[in-house]
Image (tube, rainbow, N blue to C red):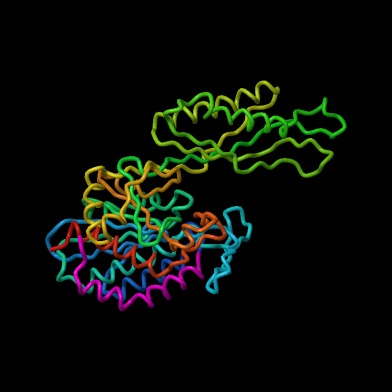
Amino acid sequence: MSLDPALREALTGDLAQIVADYKDFHRTPELSMQETRTAAEIDSRLTALGLTTHSFGGTGIVAVIDNGDGPVVGYRADIDGLPIVEDTGLDYASTAKGTLPDGATTQVMHGCGHDTHITVGLYLAKYLVEHTDLWSGTVVMLFQPGEETGQGARAMLDDGLWDKIVRPEVIYGQHVWPGRAGHVYVSKGTAMAMSDCLRVTVRGKQAHGSQPENAVDPIVLGAYMITRLQSVVSREISGSDMAVVTVGTFHGGLKENIIPDSAEFKLNIRTFTEEVREVVLDRVRRIIEAEAIASGAPEPEIEEMYRFPRCFNDPQETAGFIDTVGAELGAEQVHLDKPATGSEDVGAFGDDIGVPYVYWFFGGYSPAKFDGPEAPAGNHSPFFAPDDVETTLETGVRAALSAVLGKVGR
């Protein structure tokens, strides 16, 4: 829907402060499930609006904006950063540090744009509170930790979220990405891939490097496993289905002349359907176990680190979203797009209670950057940051407001 002139005027007047708030969040990212400072700031902002806040999943913050009879709508924003050394050159670049689960210290960056999501979510709440004459119903604001590790949505749900908070009829959420600023991109049906991350410990037998006959070499064995895993997609999955198998780490040994007793690698799997997901996981396990047998090695350990659920945009709600947000931004600014191979845990909020949801993307790059000779940096890059910050944030707020008011607006 097209926003009321009063809302447009408020947004225009606040834009400089919106940008300043975004830059503050950009400077101070925190790792997944450790977002204490971020959660405290969100809590403070919502409380200042007169809202009662609730904590779920450790650092998740929820506020319910109750404005009489009408539909109940949920809106989710994720809040965690990434273990990335920022290299944007911005004067508000992050120098924050954090501690990884293994105890290692790392620099932290909002390399996936969650600083944008926090800011948009807070101003969505602000305008809903300040303009209650424009709508009737209830909006549930969900500020979720731990999206990057797939822990956050599940932690909030396991903490009794929908037992303690009014259940919405539809849930919305959005994500900044390397698209054109001012534009929105959405998929009908499958919106993002499911994801599985496995840690594989390859067992061997240690020996001196000069006496390989006394060893079972886990590095060679691991190399064969990794090479063979590349055939899962190319030879065991139909060309009409999507699957990606990526081995992202491989570690083994401490000295060049010692064959170690173990090695470790981690792999990530992306699929669009449960059927293909189960086939890929089965083939991955079969190959790893069979290669160990072929090498005369002990049984390897295959550990599930985390998994992301499906993200499936309800087709009917998505069609309504396209019409509603298109009326505000312009139909030519809203694009029906193919599914993304990245993953999200936002779908868990709706899937757990059988509620439809719509999750979309909004662009962060100016035309000069987007259409330039080099492709703009994508999410999870040390170079990722919107270069047209005002347009990016304004579009995020306008899209969120028009989507939510499209359900609860008078």
Query: Which residue is situated farthest in the right direction here?
Result: 210
Number of marks present in the image shown: 0
Q: Residue 353 in the image: x percent, y percent?
A: 26, 45
| Vertical relation: 53 (above or below) 56 | below
Image coords of residue 233 (percent x, y): 52, 29
- Toward which corner of the image does residue 99 lie, by quadrant? bottom right
Q: Position of residue 408 (x, y in %)?
A: 17, 60
Is residue 152 or residue 404 the one in the foreground? Answer: 404
Classify residue 405 by image quadrant.
bottom left
Residue 362 vs 336, above or below: the answer is below
Considering only vertical position in the picture, is 267 above or below 212? below
The secondary structure making up most of the magenta span is helix
Q: Which span of residues is magenta-colored?
A: 1-29
Q: Residue at x 62, y 28 (%)?
A: 228
169 left or right of 95 in image: left
Q: Is 265 situated left or right of 114 in this image?
A: right
User: At 49% from the left edge and 57% from the top edge, which residue is drawn?
Assistant: 32
Which quadrant of the figure contains the N terminus? bottom left
Quadrant for the C terminus, please.
bottom left
Residue 9: where, in percent of width, then height? 25, 76
Is residue 180 or residue 145 the one in the foreground? 180
Q: Does the magenta segment cover residue 15?
A: yes
The residue drawn where x is 32% and y is 62% is 62
- In reply to whether residue 229 is colored magenta, the answer given is no
